[in-house]
Amino acid sequence: MSLVKIEAFDVRNIESATIEPSPRLNFVVGPNASGKTSLLEAVYLLGRARSFRTAQVNQAIRFGQSGLMVTGKIRNDAGLVVPSGVHITRNKREIHLAGRTIHSSAELIRAFPVLVIQPASGALLEGAPKHRRQFLDWGVFHIEESYLDCWRRYVKALSQRNTLVREKRLREIELWNREVARYGTIMDGARERYAERLKPFFLQSAARFFAGFKFDLHVQSGWNKSKTLEAVLQEDVAADIRLGHTQSGPHKADFSITLDGRPARAYLSRGQMKLLVYALLLAQSLLMEESAGVSACVLIDDVASELDEDNKNRLLGFLRERRTQFFITATAEQIIKEAVDDDAAVFHVEHGQVMQSMN
Ligand SMILES: Nc1ncnc2c1ncn2[C@@H]1O[C@H](COP(=O)(O)OP(=O)(O)OP(=O)(O)O)[C@@H](O)[C@H]1O
Ligand SMILES: [Mg+2]
């Protein structure tokens, strides 16, 4: 999967930009506030119809404009070029894919998987568990076709159970326990299988940045696994009514990374945490490539922040070996000079203008 062309209109300070990126490394270089992250945001919008910077995608519309538009041509892994486009106005979102208007972003996400690694990605290790659940779910979504449907059914059943819990409708809660447990158990199984498959890729990526460290990855399902989810839900009814919500289930799942058996986040330095996030997200894209034959487009914002020269070179060396399409932002060109080879493209951004430089 790679983006062969993208046109962005009225995305933050970019009035209009057209680029034809390399299928491998693309460097986006320019001073602060020039529009580098905005260009990455445009690529992300094309793949997710959302922004990675804000939950209010409207904020990405250029000041004074009524909407933004991003169109692109995506070469899928079968070699076919598919046109796609996302148009966002203050109160509407329109998605086009292969000449059709589509109503769910799931189809777009599958057609053009985009991953982002940015300074805020630290939340994957340091933030609330929901970030880690989203990470697992995004990964499973791309390798298990039926997962989305199961996830939706679980969310619906859980919301129904929560309503009944708040209204203290005991008899009906019991009926819904079965439904929540049914989809919750399938979801949990899919997440566990995913984590097992991810682990070797994670360990392999982490070994590139950490010599002699013994990492491990553990999934916590969200309930006491010595019992079935249905039994736990049944036991929890009185306590759930007191709390006003369902306290056990995959919506409480999490995962942790350990280092020699200790929680990694309690012992690693900032730079090391950043490398660990790289290892996790790059492992996710590696697994996708290996297991589903689908390569994601990976956006790396602010590559140099918090990484020393050696680690930055290690990272860029790792990226260069991959066949994945990367978009990497940096403020200074010398930061990436050694990494630019014949297959790489460099884009200079200044005051929202994007220019491709010939290398
Ligand atoms: N909706 C908007 N309309 C117009 N301009 C915006 C909008 N939102 C943000 N901006 C401006 O766009 C400019 C580019 O922002 P962007 O985050 O892309 O810069 P950057 O090149 O990534 O900078 P840095 O190196 O500091 O990360 C900034 O001056 C920002 O204030
Ligand atoms: Mg930026």
Image: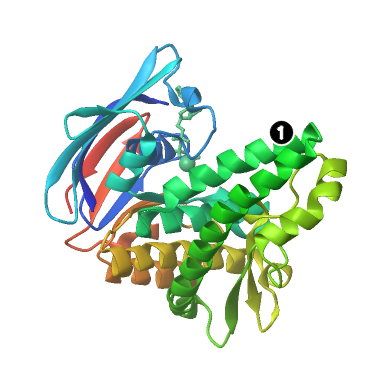
Regarding residue 184, the answer to whether it shows in the image is yes
Tell me where residue 60 sits by quadrant: top left
Q: Position of residue 310 (x, y in %)?
A: 47, 73
Determine whether the residue tagged by mark 1 lies in a helix, strand or loop.
Answer: helix
On screen, residue 325 versus residue 173, left or right, reads: left
- Count how many numbered circles sit on residues in the image: 1
Horizontal side, residue 295 vs residue 127: left or right: left
Q: At x 38% / y 58%, what residue is drawn? A: 144
Label 1 CB-ligand 1 distance < 8 A: no
The amino acid type, in three-letter code, at marker 1 is: Thr
Camera-nearest residue between 164 and 274: 164
Q: Find disc 1 in the rendering and name its residue.
A: 163
**Above or below — where is 68 with respect to 2?**
above
> 274 and 286: which one is in front?
286
Q: Position of residue 17 (x, y in %)?
A: 26, 30
Quadrant where the C terminus is found in the figure: bottom left
The answer to whether residue 331 is visible is no
Quarter-wise, where is residue 276 in the image?
Answer: bottom right
Percent x, y of residue 142: 37, 55
